[in-house]
Image (cartoon, helix red, strand yellow):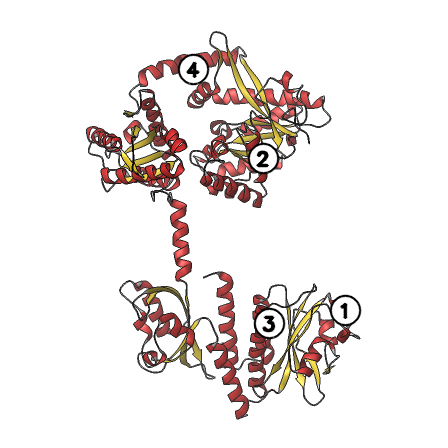
Amino acid sequence: MQSHDFSLLEMQQNIHELIAQQHPLEETLAAITDWVSLMMPGALVSIMRCDPDTQTLSMVPSNQFSPDYVDQMQNIPIGPDQGTCGSAAYLRDPVVTDNIQNDPKWDGYHHLAEAEGLRACWSVPILTADGALLGTFASYYRSAVSPTNGAQRNLSRGAALAALTILRHRDLTARKAQEAELHQLQRGIEASPHGILMADAQQPDHPVVYVNPAFCEITGYPREEVLGQNSRFLQGSDTDPKAIKAVRLGLEQKTDVDVTLLNYRKDGTPFWNHLIIRPVLDTTGECTHFIGIQQDISQQKEQEAKIRFQATHDLLTGLPNQAAFTETLEELLGHTSGTDMLAMFYLDLDGFKPINEGLGHRIGNRILQAVAQRLKAVMPERATIARLVGDEFGIVLPDCPGRNAIIQLAEKVLQSLGEPIEVDQQMIHISASIGIASNSDKAVQPHQLLQFADLALDRAKRQGRNTWQWYGADKAEHSRHSVTLRHELHTALKENQFELYYQPLVDAVTGRMRSVEALVRWHHPVRGMVSPAEFIPLAEQTGQIVPLGLWVLRQACQEMAEFNGRRERSLRVAVNISSLQFIRDGFLDDVFRILEETGLSPQLLELEVTESVLIDGVEHVIKLMEALKDRGIRVALDDFGTGFSSLSYLRDLPTHKVKLDRSFVQNTATDRRIAAIVQGVITMAHHMDMMVVAEGIETREQQEDLARRHCDILQGYLFARPMPLAELCLLPEILPANSNE
């Protein structure tokens, strides 16, 4: 149940209680105006009482209007030209003034409306059942506006409750007034869309003495089958015992109850009931009855369950998605002892892309569904199978009996997937490559196990596909290469073999350069240019990323300070910072010292980090980012959407920019789900006052697509490849070079 609906329901219940318990008139009328105000956003609600002797109207004091206006609205004559309320009282019909300044009925009152800032007024007379005038019920607005059908109904509902209240306080001893009040109250309850019942609190077993039509409609029980019974007949075998206990305790103690429980209709179908029970007290304070208000929230519950499923599952295959899989991994690793073996399969279909593109996505989707079914048929019940992304699947196996059993299971998977799949009378052959890793490979975090299995998968593909590989089989050769490269990396730092290249980031619509990203390049004296994809991960593993990162930061600040000194419009430079460097003690001091020494303005420096900085906790990272932000240094979240991205990072981290990974850009035009994710990230980021950068833009179509999606900044080969500083100085302001603003 939405909080707004709950508030209305609670306020309506409170009004009925105020009326029934004979609270002071002004208190009850104020509650009615507050209730109607909540139903009519933007309205200023007033009640004017009629003096039958003088035939005038006087506004009931209200905090919705200024004291001066309330004073001026006393003893207003009832007549056809006496404003909106005076006319409504005179005509005994609703009167609408959608523009006060243009309405001659407001002559003599225009200055009061102008001073109060009122532009429109809708008024309905408050009448007794026999048509006697009690006053008017009106809503004012600060702009010219006409009422909707719903607004008119809300005014009528407010007028009806106001009539009940005034009659109850006018003459409690008058039988006719009492009958009118009870009749109005019954009409209000009978018209309620919520099920309402009353039970006798002083009789054994609390028999039901009243139900409204909505109760009968929701439950399917006719009134005669309900009266005299205890309402427990709505309960069933699946009703939560805790909810039943809460209801019983409230009845025993005569206190308020607010629960959601599963009830059953007469035909046996279940429905979710949001039930509120309140004790009804007489003038002596004794509880005589219980009033229960119920709302069928089954549809809301179904929607919530659907949303929960969509958040954790792949809708095509029905398998858990990557987020749920990672969470399961984390939970299993946390509960696995040192002697328990846990294994993970990282499975990728061989040659799926040509099938998907050649035969169409519908066929591709059918194949993915068939693969999911075969995996579930082969795997033991304790296994968790997930579709990670595209044609990649993850499987985690707790309590494994040993390495041989896991290998046999991998062979079964390959054999099962090797059988042809029939789709639309076509026999389609497909195979898979599997990477295997286990907690015995020193993987203690989900991302480590995924990484190890992914590395093993890569080796399986290099060995011809349709096979499996266990992480660590080729470690010796890899280790020797790593040792050599580590030594050469150390030498490169000492001999200044590195150079910075810069890639522009441009406005998505105009193509104007907005900033640049600094990218490190290694000029090896023997091997030539070494790919960053080769030496950056090694530097991360060995800790050499810290001195390398400091060199990049200093060099970028120094070069961009000189570069901007020769330009009319300065460009901001973005520098990638590894998680190891970011959380290292003294990092902030290093940044501030380099800025001071190079003379680059803090406002022209942007640090790019990935969510891996959060591995050791969020709180410390947020403090670091806040400290940078206080100095004017911006922080961007890089590679969002890859690996283990979580929406909580957008919520928690004080970043100003999100960079979408190139893998999303490449598939946005062909995969509507990825397109929906991209659009969702852009929309969410903008609502949180963050800019969005898309990487890997290579075609004009990609630029136009992301511009239509209101992506802010673009980066990619379409505009410029990474280049030395000398070439950057020659670039035009608008990219690509043949673009026009």
Residues under labels 1 and 4: Cα distance? 83 Å
Residues under labels 3 and 1: Cα distance? 22 Å
For the point 59% across and 66% down, the residue is 40
Q: Position of residue 476 (x, y in %)?
A: 31, 16
Residue of label 4: 486
Give the mark, 2 or 3, whose residue is nearer the N terminus.
3
Look at label 3 and name its amino acid. Gln
Mark 1 against mark 4, which lies toward the viewer?
1
Look at label 1 and name its amino acid. Asn
- Residue 278 seen anywhere in this rendered image of the structure: no
Return the mark for residue 102.
1
Residues under labels 2 and 1: Cα distance? 49 Å
Residues under labels 2 and 3: Cα distance? 47 Å
On the picture, is 585 further left or further right than 261? right
Look at label 2 and name its amino acid. Glu
Residue of label 2: 704
On the picture, is 198 further left or further right than 232? right
